[in-house]
Image (tube, grey):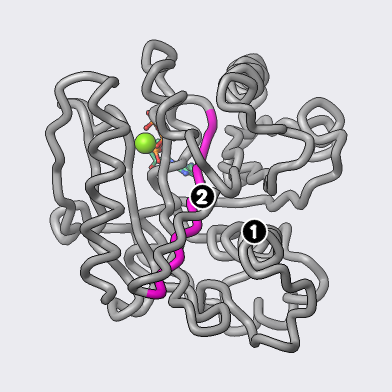
Amino acid sequence: MAVVNYATKNLAIKIVYYGPGLSGKTTNLRYIYFKLDPASLGELICLETDTERTYFFDLLPIRAGMIGEFKVHFQLMTVPGQVFYEASRKSVLKGTDGIIFVADSQIPLLDANLESFDGLRRNCLQHDIDLNQIPLVFQYNKRDLNYLIPVETFNNLLNPRKCPHVEAVAINGVGVFETLREISKLTVPAVREKYFGEKRRAEIGPAGPAVPDAAGPGASASSQGAAEGVDFTPPIEEESLQVTKVKVKSPRDVEDELDKLSREYSEKLK
Ligand SMILES: Nc1nc2c(ncn2[C@@H]2O[C@H](COP(=O)(O)OP(=O)(O)OP(=O)(O)O)[C@@H](O)[C@H]2O)c(=O)[nH]1
Ligand SMILES: [Mg+2]
């Protein structure tokens, strides 16, 4: 559920990028971090092991317009995909408003995708999150590689609910903002209705991340026009990425750390 601070008029919508190890979750956040207007961004906070893989989570807060007089920001978080971080994946899902499932499109990784989605189902159950109701978007990533799982197969196996799906090459930014747009289209109205009892968008104006126009191959028809003039991003240079490293001793500390970071960010927005 979104965190609403009535005193400071801030509203935080939490989005979790879930998926198997190395599917490209952190790559999505890095791309967003590089492409969004710095004025809209908070710090990118990462916990990584020595091998650069996500240890507990990455967190990127971004501003996302207004709902009525409330400043909305999205907290984008990734879970660590490696199998042994199950406790950490579970913690990060707590209280989420929307989920982006980042699948790895390579055929040999079909089982890893299915196992990860099963894990998501299990973890959602434990947090009383109804996977049939919560805003959910699928990103089928790494479409630049060979021997790909067909989109239709993915949809049959993972997406009987017919949630939005986006084909992506996150490493080049293709589909990254499209995915973010899709999840904001689902989460913002849900949050608006839940907290403000409002259903009609026109009355209170739009809210959603002010994302640059960069449509991927899976872009929906309504945004295809934005595909023209897409800025093809050069490879990200690791040295130029400003990442704040947060030390967490055990998965149990993750929830405390998330609460603390969320409070600090809300303070900054005052
Ligand atoms: N070819 C290709 N490689 C990609 C793409 N997206 C990400 N990668 C690469 O895949 C690797 C893993 O990406 P990450 O973003 O770190 O994966 P992750 O899902 O965060 O992994 P964990 O944190 O371990 O769960 C990196 O080497 C990326 O450069 C893509 O679209 N195409
Ligand atoms: Mg990662």
Q: Quadrant of the C terminus?
A: bottom left
Q: Is residue 144 above or below residue 22?
A: below
Read off the magenta span: 9-19
- Please state which of residues 113 and 80 is positioned toward the viewer in this rendering: 80
Vertical order, 232 against 255 (above or below): below
- Can you give x and y, in whole percent of width and height, for residue 56 in the image? 30, 29
Front-most of residues 56 and 97: 97
Determine crowd level at label 1: few under 14, some 14-19, many 20+ residues with C-alpha closer than 10 A.
many
Identify the image quadrant of residue 85.
top left
Q: Which residue is mark 1?
A: 187
Where is 10 relative to 61, above or below? below
Q: Residue 141's quadrant in the figure?
A: top right
Taking the image as shown, residue 31 lies to the left or right of residue 176, namely left
- Residue in the image at 17% along x and 29% along y: 248
Disc 2 element: strand
Residue annotated with mark 2: 15
In magenta stretch: residue 22: no
Q: Quadrant of residue 10?
A: bottom left
Q: Are marks 2 and 1 in contact (CB under 8 Å)?
A: yes
Q: What amino acid type should be assigned to the residue bearing mark 2?
A: Ile
Alpha carbon distance from label 2 to label 1: 9 Å
Q: Residues within 10 Å of mark 2 (few under 14, many from 20)?
A: many
Q: Residue at x 67, y 59 (%)?
A: 194
Q: Position of residue 53 (x, y in %)?
A: 29, 30
* Residue 72 makes an appearance in the image: yes
Name the amino acid type tagged 1: Thr
Q: Is residue 175 left or right of residue 80?
A: right
